[in-house]
Image (spheres, helix red, strand yellow):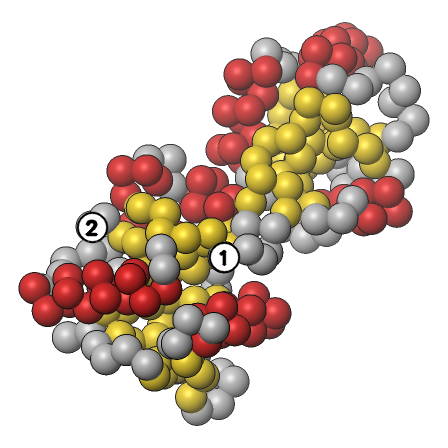
């Protein structure tokens, strides 16, 4: 048996993961073709590399099918309501930073805060007969944030594509989405609320609290954590 380490399977996130571990003496590599999602680990014995989409890694960690995994804070907290009971944060990796924010059209000059949004949502429903729509991929995090912020009279609509375009396409009146530079928001004539920061996210190494470990695997895990300085 080996400890299973899950990392994102493609793109810059995978490359940056490989670089981060390489700087700490663990050399991760993809083996086989691009479609095989197989990998190898050199530098520490007893570790198997599993390549998955970043969105799958929280579920696999929570189920105990991975011992360790790299994925974003946003994905962990959105997909796992009890994430602190299921996962332990080992180390933030210093890349993949992005903010989950609430944004509205720039021409809503009187809407800058959550209180303003709550008032606008009530006025919108009175005028149009239906609730103001907020497009997002992050339903759980956004719903809890709005509950704490005291915003009512809204409806979340699912967006799995280009969320920033939903307002222009008239399928939503506001959005909640990940942004790193804000350029896409500005290009779509959107502005973040001044108190609309829902979550700061970055790529992070997590440990599953539920994955079974033999004594040998526990020792391997301790050695790995010591090696990467976490």
How many residues crowd around disc 2 within 10 Å: few (fewer than 14), some, or many (20 or more)? Answer: some
Residue 68 drawn above or below residue 191: below
Estimate the x, y position of residue 98 in percent, counting from the top left. Answer: 63, 47
- The residue tagged 2 is 210
Estimate the x, y position of residue 93 in percent, counting from the top left. Answer: 49, 57
Q: Secondary structure at mark 1?
A: loop
Horizontal relation, residue 70 to residue 67: left or right:
right
Between residue 3 and residue 164, name the one nearer to us: 3
How many residues crowd around disc 1 within 10 Å: few (fewer than 14), some, or many (20 or more)? Answer: some
Task: Return the disc, 2 or 1, that comes first in the chain's sequence.
Answer: 1
Horizontal relation, residue 116 to residue 29: left or right:
right
- The residue tagged 1 is 93
User: Is residue 52 shown to the viewer in this render?
Assistant: no
Q: Quadrant of residue 99?
A: top right
Horizontal relation, residue 40 to residue 54: left or right:
left
Q: Secondary structure at mark 2?
A: loop
């Amino acid at each position: 048996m080996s400890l299973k380490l899950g990392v994102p399977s493609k793109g810059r996130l995978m490359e940056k993961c490989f670089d981060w571990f390489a700087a700490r003496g663990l050399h991760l590599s993809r083996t086989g073709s691009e479609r095989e999602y197989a990998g190898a680990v050199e530098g520490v014995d007893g570790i198997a590399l599993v390549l998955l989409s970043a969105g799958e890694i929280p579920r696999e960690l929570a189920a105990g099918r991975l011992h360790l995994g790299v994925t974003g804070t946003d994905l962990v907290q959105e997909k796992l309501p009890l994430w602190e009971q299921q996962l332990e944060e080992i180390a933030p990796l210093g890349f993949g930073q992005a903010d989950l924010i609430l944004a509205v059209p720039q021409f809503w000059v009187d809407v800058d805060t959550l209180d303003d949004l709550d008032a606008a949502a009530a006025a919108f429903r009175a005028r149009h007969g239906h609730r103001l729509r907020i497009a997002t991929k992050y339903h759980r995090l956004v719903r809890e944030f709005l509950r704490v912020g005291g915003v009512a009279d809204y409806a979340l609509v699912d967006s799995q594509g280009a969320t920033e375009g939903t307002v222009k396409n008239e399928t939503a009146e506001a959005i909640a989405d990940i942004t790193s530079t804000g350029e896409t928001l500005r290009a779509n004539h959107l502005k973040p609320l001044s108190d609309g920061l829902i979550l700061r996210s970055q790529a992070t190494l997590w440990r599953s609290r539920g994955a079974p470990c033999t004594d040998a695997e526990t020792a391997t895990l301790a050695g790995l954590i010591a090696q990467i300085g976490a």
